[in-house]
Amino acid sequence: MIEIATEPWEMMVRHAELTYPNECCGAMLGRLNGGSKLVTEAIPMENAYAGEQAARYELRPEDLLEADHQARARGLDLIGIFHSHPDCDAYFSTTDLKNSCPWYSFVVLSIQNGKFNHANSFLPDVDQTAAEREELKWPKF
Amino acid sequence: MAKILIPTALRQFTEQSDSVDVTGATVREALDQLTVRYPNIKKNLFNDQGKLRSFVNVYVNDEDIRYLDKDGTKLTGSETISIVPSVAGGATAVADTAPALSNEEVARYSRHLILPEVGMEGQTKLKRASVVMIGAGGLGAPLGLYLAAAGVGRIGIVDFDVVDASNLQRQVIHGTSDIGRKKLDSAGDRMRDINPNIRVDKFDAGLTSENALEILRDYDIVVDGTDNFATRYLVNDACAILKKPNVYGSIFRFEGQASVFTYQDGPCYRCLYPEPPPPGLVPSCAEGGVLGILPGIIGVIQATEAAKIILGIGTPLKGRLLLYDALEMRFRELKLRRNPECPVCGDHPTITKLIDYQEFCGMPPMNAEPAPTGDAIDAIELKRKLDRGDNFVLIDVREPHEYQIARIPGARLIPLGELPKHLRELDLNGEYVMQCKSGARSQRAVDLLKQNGFKNVVNMTGGILAWSDKVDPSVPKY
């Protein structure tokens, strides 16, 4: 189970809505508590995909490295990656799976007509052949 | 001792340690130590062949080892080694929505499909791609042929011209039987004959400030095969505004240029040439000539760049101007940088919509009034003057090799470039008729004589081409 606190959640939704109609991306920091994860901070990142970004995103490894440094400095863990699917459901696409990494939770936000619609979290396997749905809790207003 | 920082998710394999100290002379040795000490972490970092998994990047301090010596990168013992995943994705995987290739297409593209850099994924990208060619002439000919053959799914052509005999020496997409047909139709038929799987969109028009954004908006890539500065600046500015890659090529006599403009953060044509040359300084191919084979090589370079951009492979020709000299058989390369002050692609662009490019290039508007009569005579009138035996001198300002092809009887040859030093031989009060191939250079000769005090000088409109059309068809047109 992964739970996202109010402040990072608002940051993620805002980043996704502002980046619409392109895909946004970023990292999530927080704490592990046994099997469950709590996200206490979100770091919006630049979509580095060189091309049409309406349906693609790419994170710079340097940005992830920096996020990892920040997490360590504050006694947090880098626990997940988020990105948006503009005008598209929050599923884990083949492209997502083939470019994933099994160490993190992947939260996908569906943005419909510029507004947040729904979200899901996924845990890809090490061979990039399948991704398991993970229970996701975000603050409901 | 070097230190390996362990990402959160992998700490379950390292007894919750967030860093592990290792010795080892190289990154590979350091990682091997890690996996010997914590065997369960191995599967997360290496595949069954023992290679680092595709999503694993290793940094030594702040440097990616791919840009150092890969896993042979040397360690002195004080480094921090970070393991960083590469992560990407997107809503639609190409393979999810792309039209599948038919059996006929699989057979047709088999030499592409067996290239790992292309494969089914790349060929599908080509099929989904759209490219618009500005001009179906010298550069457009090889472009159209190869883009069609390569399987680019939708190809737009913008051209208003008809096939002329003088095109066939270089515009290999058209044949002798196409003379008089629209280039759009001739090129379209040839491309669809090569590859019936593609779609050809025909725009029977010159590209203008009014229609450019509308036409180009609909395509992934623009390929510029134009032969004049006004259209070249128009294509450049439209691509900068639309943020589309502009694959540029140009040719003259025995030399060519190519580059990729307005692609990613690269420069544009205006970063290279902020202003067009004064009109008339750089002759067109019609005036200066061109080796027929030359557009073949430049056009194929443009087609290659377009295909690379679609496939996302190799190093694009952006930020580089490729210069080709056929006589020396030499390629050179100039580095180009985006100019932050560039009026169209700079940090604070001042040109945000299309302007009047005829005016920008110092040319009279397309529908300008013809020069007032009295300064010009046509071929028929020249013939009458000659027949009447009027007292005037006909001066042919073309080059000697052109004079050898065809001439008007009685014309005296003084090439335009040599005219200034022959002025003293001419009579200020004499009557002169200036003539060239089509009337452009002779008009400049008229201007030159008038500036030097000659009163009675007229241009022969249409040049020797008009003479052949209207007076003496036995004179060959070139």
Image (cartoon, coloured by chain):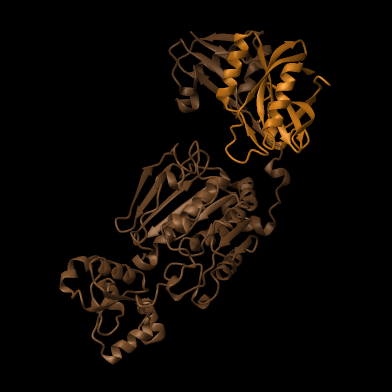
* Depth order, front residue of B463/B11: B463
Q: For residue B194, which quarter of the picture?
A: bottom right
Q: For residue B159, which quarter of the picture?
A: bottom right
Left or right position of B240 against B339: right
List x then y, in percent, for residue B40: 66, 16
The answer to whether residue B196 is seen in the rendering is yes
List x then y, in percent, for residue B158: 56, 62
Residue drawn at x 80%, y 20% as measured from the top left: A138
* Depth order, front residue of B426/B473: B426
Q: Quadrant of the C terminus of chain B?
A: bottom left
List x then y, in percent, for residue A120: 78, 27
The answer to whether residue A106 is seen in the rendering is no
Q: In the picture shown, does residue B366 fall above or below B306?
A: below
Outermost residue, bottom direction? Answer: B388
Q: In the picture shown, does residue B348 fall above or below B270?
A: above
Chain A color in figure: orange
Q: Which chain is brown?
A: B
Outermost residue, left direction? Answer: B425
List x then y, in percent, for residue A12: 71, 24
* Depth order, front residue of A50/A61: A50
Residue drawn at x 29%, y 88% as measured from the top left: B386
Q: For residue A5, which quarter of the picture?
A: top right
